Amino acid sequence: MSKEKIVDCVIIGSGPAGYSAAIYAARADLNPILFSGLQPGGQLISTTNVDNYLGFPVGISGKELMENCKKQAERFNVEIIHKNVSEVHFSNQKGGIHSINVENKESIKSKGIIIATGSRPKFLEIEKEKKLMGLGVSFCATCDGFFHKGKDVAVVGGGDTALEEASYLSKICRNVYLLVRKNYFRASKSLQNSLLKKKNINILFGHRIIEIIGDNFLEGIKIMNNNNQSNSKILFISGLFIAIGHFPNTDIFQKKLSLDERGYILVEKGSTRTNKPGVFAAGDVQDPIYRQAITSAGSGCMAALDLERYLS
């Protein structure tokens, strides 16, 4: 990378949104440079099976899917750099030049930037939680619920996402245990009312997980009543869905871009434009609602098209 050269497109992030943006940008002759970041391939790398991505009738592993995305980007001569962006200086002027610092050592200048840094789930910070990710522990019922059809599962959380996950799982699983740390829900009343009508959802208020059971795959969880800590029991389940929230990967954009109260990048309705000219956001970093690989890939396409129109 030459410090004097000004490129048309820099993409930060290498999940479905980043690679989709790269492919569309390359086909538009924008010669994109993609920085893969700290987790090349994004969250899908740790997903054992992806069963709901269009075009794979028998499913595909998350790792293989992202490797395919990378190969496709390389076919269009996308320059993929396995480094982390440490800081970005945005121009406030239309047609201005942005400066991207790479690992505090070098910088590159670009007319346009697509941010696709994704998000990361909040963990319970319990032993074996990360070890068994994709082996029974999941952060997405829509992605992984199918593998537990007719079985017993548990959901952790008391907000909208947790209740939505539990409701979805109740349609395909035998029993759903909903573990709520507090003695009340934080979710909307409409979701609460809907959930209470589900006969196979067992709500356990004031409970938390103290142990995850299983070595090679999830076998169960030990839970404790917060009000009576001598009262613990084991739930034998095949799936544990953690729904206590996500963190958008926007630390380096704090006070530089318009973010919502949770840290997600705000974009104009119906587009991927941020509040900075020539800067676009795609995927989970600007989507706290859907958080699906296919919606991320779609917004990556949108970002590349938005950037192409901006430059022309």
Image (spheres, rainbow, N blue to C red):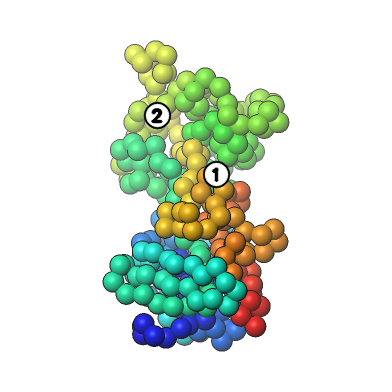
**What's the amino acid at mark 2?**
Ile
Q: Quadrant of the C terminus?
A: bottom right
Answer above or below: position of 278 versus 63.
below
Q: Please indicate, yes or no, whether residue 147 appears anywhere in the rendered image.
A: no
Image check: 216 left or right of 201?
Answer: left
Residue 274 lies, in percent from the top left, at 59, 62
Outermost residue on the left side: it is: 105
Circle 2 crowding by C-alpha within 10 Å: few under 14, some 14–19, many from 20: some
Query: Which residue does the image show at 46% across and 83% down from the upper left?
Result: 6
Query: Which residue does the image show at 42% across and 54% down from the upper left?
Result: 251
Marking on residue 209? 2
Marking on residue 2? none
Question: Which circle's residue, 1 or 2, is located before the other in the chain?
Answer: 2
Residue 31 lies, in percent from the top left, at 50, 84
Of residues 120 and 219, the one nearer the viewer is 120
**What's the amino acid at mark 1?**
Glu
Please name the residue that numbered disc 1 is placed on: 261
